[in-house]
Amino acid sequence: MSNLADVKAGLRSLHIETPSWAYGNSGTRFKVFPQQGVPRTPFEKISDAAQVHRFTGTAPSVALHIPWDRVDDFAGLAAYAHDQGVRIGAINSNVFQDPDYMLGSVTNPDPRVRRKAVQHLLECVDIMDATGSRDLKLWFSDGLNYPGQDDLRDRQDRLAEALREVYDRLGQGQRMLLEYKLFEPAFYATDVPDWGTSYAHCVELGPKAAVCIDTGHHAPGTNIEFIVAFLLRAGRLGAFDFNSRFYADDDLMAGAADPFQLFRIMYEIARADALGPDIAFMLDQCHNIEPKIPAVLRSVMNVQEATAKALLVDRDALRSAQQTGDVLGANAVLMDAYNTDVRPLLADLRAESGLDPDPTAAYRRSGYAERIIAERAGGQQAGWGA
Ligand code: LRH
Ligand code: MN
Ligand code: MN
């Protein structure tokens, strides 16, 4: 058994960043079902994110997506976040919705479009300067639908050139996180399809570049914890976009589809003593049919539960079973930890920090949900593209 004080210390060091877009309306390409009380502005999104931190004590930052969260005064937005008890986290760029990007952004064959995309990424670094954000998160939808549509290798050259310009603009303490995704919206070839491509570009760029693993961005059956272990060993794991998937990039609540996978991922993090701030543990999910703030609370708690179980793994016993070739014994050590009910432990931890042991019940009692439904009347609710 691991030492309980160590488990609690590990859990206290875990911070989970929530995404501004999780609080807005979202849906599938078939329908967005609007919900009452949804934020209309980036300020209201931050106010919702602050509720998640207020009741969990473990979600102190909120990621922005530009231009969805564009405001005139980003320093003012950061000050507002501070007043609400949170801060601005990663700045996510968006070079996937403007019509100019139909054939790609930074890998587009047209130099004018590439320039426009790079200018957007540079503007995101300006925003980081204003908000005090550490991380620039890049995801490119760039890719091809048909063989022969463009030159695969030229596109890698264009990507490298764009990344270099943006990387060189990063200030002290700022980082670039390069996210990969196997497919969608491109269906034949994606320019950053996998961790290997992202890793290779990061190594070429320098030490401020690291890989972001979005758990929904792999082929079915991919062993994500292997990728985690590999990147940790190489010092290039910068961030997670946690979410769950049953089929593709489903963006469901983290830990909902496969809590065992989340545990295996968090075990590799615990094994590397990497729960601290060097890795950004972010959520990237959309709540299409469930109420948004309670869904984010559930997700944060699911990540905490997976982490608690990972920290409970008896690493000495595991190592000795591994070294003596005790296959079943080693597996049993891992499963014992996974099968532990950690909810009482997390309830204790919350009580020790002056929080309600049940964040969801406390949120429900707070009246916040009723208040935002009453107050957020009129105006345009935020959603993808708003
Ligand atoms: C792409 C992605 C990426 C985007 C977000 C909205 O599928 O995961 O992180 O920024 O969704
Ligand atoms: Mn993502
Ligand atoms: Mn995604």
Image (cartoon, helix red, strand yellow):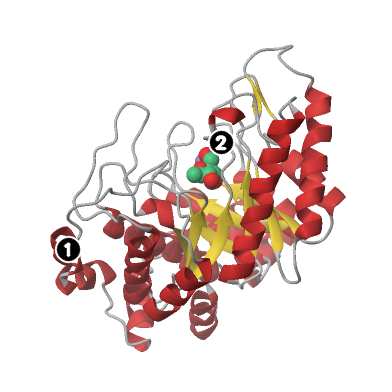
Q: Residue at image x 58%, y 36%? A: 218
Question: Which structural element holds mark 1?
Answer: helix
On screen, residue 327 above or below 83: above
On screen, residue 298 above or below 180: below
Q: Which amino acid does label 1 sit on?
A: Glu
Q: Residue at image x 56%, y 34%? A: 221
- Which residue lies under the disc numbered 1? 375
Q: Which mark is residue 331?
A: none
User: Is ligand 1 less than 8 Å from the beta carbon at label 2?
Assistant: yes
The residue carrying pointer 1 sits among few (fewer than 14), some (14 to 19) or many (20 or more) residues within 10 Å by Cα, namely few
Confirm whether residue 254 shows in the render: no
On screen, residue 64 above or below 273: above
* Residue situated in front as seen by the camera: 227 or 249: 249
Drawn side of residue 53 relative to residue 113, left or right: left
- Residue 18: image quadrant is bottom left
The residue carrying pointer 2 sits among few (fewer than 14), some (14 to 19) or many (20 or more) residues within 10 Å by Cα, namely some
Q: Residue at image x 31%, y 74%? A: 55
Estimate the x, y position of residue 366 in percent, counting from the top left: 18, 73
Drawn side of residue 294 relative to residue 77, left or right: left
Question: Which structural element holds mark 2?
Answer: loop
- Which residue lies under the disc numbered 2? 96
Estimate the x, y position of residue 310 in percent, counting from the top left: 53, 64
Drawn side of residue 93 relative to residue 201, left or right: left
